[in-house]
Image (cartoon, coloured by chain):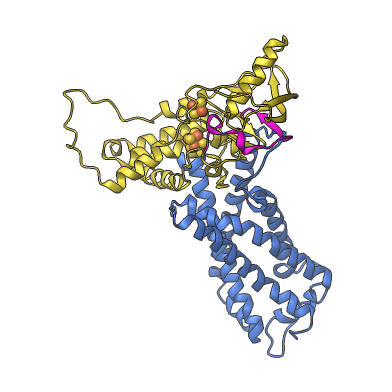
Chain colours: A blue, B yellow
Amino acid sequence: MRILTSTVGRKILMSITGQLLILFVLIHMIGNTTIFFGALNAYAEHLHSLPPLVWIFRLVMLSAIAVHICYGVQVTLENKAANPGAYAVKKQLKANFASENMIWTGLLLALFILYHLAQFTMHLTPDVVVGLDAINRPDVFKMVSTSFANAGIAVVYFFAMIMLFLHLSHGIPSFLQTMGWNNDKTIPVFGTGGKVVSAFLMLVYISIPAAILVGALK
Amino acid sequence: MSHHDSHGMNLVLHVWRQKGPNEPGKLEQYEAKNVSPDQSFLEMLDEVNEQLIKTGGDPIAFDHDCREGICGMCSQVINGVPHGGQERTTVCQLHMRNFKDGDTIYIEPWKAKAFPIQRDLIVDRTALDKISQAGGYTSAHTGGVADGNAILVPKPSADYAMDAAECIGCGACVAACPNGSAMLYTSAKVAQLAELPQGQAEAAKRVCNMVDALQENGFGNCSNHYECQAACPKGISVKFIARLNREYQKALFK
Ligand code: SF4
Ligand code: FES
């Protein structure tokens, strides 16, 4: 099938799976902010009262990530082979750190996701405190706030969110271009918009471990 | 032609020298003396070559033809930028007034897997022709000459197609691309023909075949760095790549 193997077909699949993942990042961010309203435990319990839905969601996300990573690696290897990169002097006019390092920011994010799942979903890391709150719900707030009070863990999250910023600051304008939703007027707008949206997502995500670390969230 | 005034510039050149496709290449240093600011970059190289010939050296091989920015033959990466640092300018139209006395200039050929080096600064760009041969045309009509206004083309469409048709096929987009992709070149042709009524009939087949040819001829995948547009001497816009992506999606459902 053309879409699975051709250079533009794979690009479209990278774009669509990327959009799904951005959608997830957005929903997850909104869910996380319940922590600022003291509603994290309620939110978590609500989510887990719908197991089939949670599993469908997880499956879709997992396949999107798998496709995104497989093509990302494949395409990067092909691109390295197509460019001997042997200029003695090469000046970048438009490409930048974010666009050139998608593979690395992406793979670091994949590692982070594994760590994050091992920690807060599977409770495998030693820092995780599992317990119930006053009304017998799983105490997600206590778990998260205990872990983030550890500066080392908070720093891992800060670093990962910087990777997310870099990845999306190229990824957002890039998926729009790949879908063909672009013209001379929108190109610069999407370029700046992509950076602004990515920075916003990064800051909201970072604000949670940061607030816990400085003791503003108890 | 260039005039020899004694106040010309003296430049240090580092030029890629390579005897043949399978020979190793390296940068070699030359001096360009008494260069007039009114000379073009290629005229400056012509004089360096004259000196080389006089002293029994081997002249630097480089591609050129029209020397007026329309044929797309000239192809040199100058100080790290295809066609040099001046926007929307081919090497042949780049003038030495853009440099100053004492400057060091690095001159290298296009470097991409799809463009094997033939000699010094000359590369083989047949791979681009292969892409165009795969669909960069409308099938020939037979019969009498059609009336000029028989097919109506709205002015905005004509302008759009003309902008895309400005591509001179030089390959600077490939040379600049971190992925060695020819997506800008391919998209310019796809967009130009998809915009016009004459090209629409074959639009789906064209985009698929040209994209396949791009992939089969050693070019990399486009990952939207937009380095191509910045290097293109004709300022071909990456909006045409967005158009190619749209045309490709339409073709997928055909
Ligand atoms: S798109 Fe621009 S850089 Fe690429 S071949 Fe055409 S004129 Fe040259
Ligand atoms: S020599 Fe023809 S475009 Fe430069």
Residue A178 on image: x %, y % = 49, 50
Total numbered badges shown on the rendered structure: 0
Name, please, the residue furthest toward the bottom. Answer: A134
Q: Is residue B126 magenta?
A: no
Question: In terms of image quadrants, where is residue A89?
Answer: top right
Q: Nearer the viewer, residue B130 or B7?
A: B7
Residue B126 on image: x %, y % = 51, 23
Quarter of the figure with the C terminus of chain B: top left
Give the magenta part as a residue range.
B89-110
Quarter of the figure with the N terminus of chain B: top right
Is residue B21 in view from this perspective? no
Q: Nearer the viewer, residue A131 or B146?
A: B146
Q: Is residue A176 left or right of residue B21?
A: left
Name, please, the residue furthest toward the top. Answer: B56
Question: In terms of image quadrants, where is residue A62?
Answer: bottom right
Q: Is residue B58 above or below residue A25?
A: above
Residue A119 on image: x %, y % = 75, 67
- Identify which residue is drawn at 83% across, 68% down: A152
- Identify which residue is drawn at 58% across, 24% down: B2
Residue A186 on image: x %, y % = 46, 57
Q: Is residue A96 above or below residue B37?
A: below
- Identify which residue is drawn at 51% across, 49% down: A13
- Identify which residue is drawn at 74% across, 34% down: B102
Q: Nearer the viewer, residue A26 or B161?
A: B161
Q: Is residue B195 left or right of residue B240?
A: left
Q: Is residue A180 above or below residue A138?
A: above
Q: Nearer the viewer, residue B62 or B111?
A: B62
Is residue B241 in view from this perspective? yes
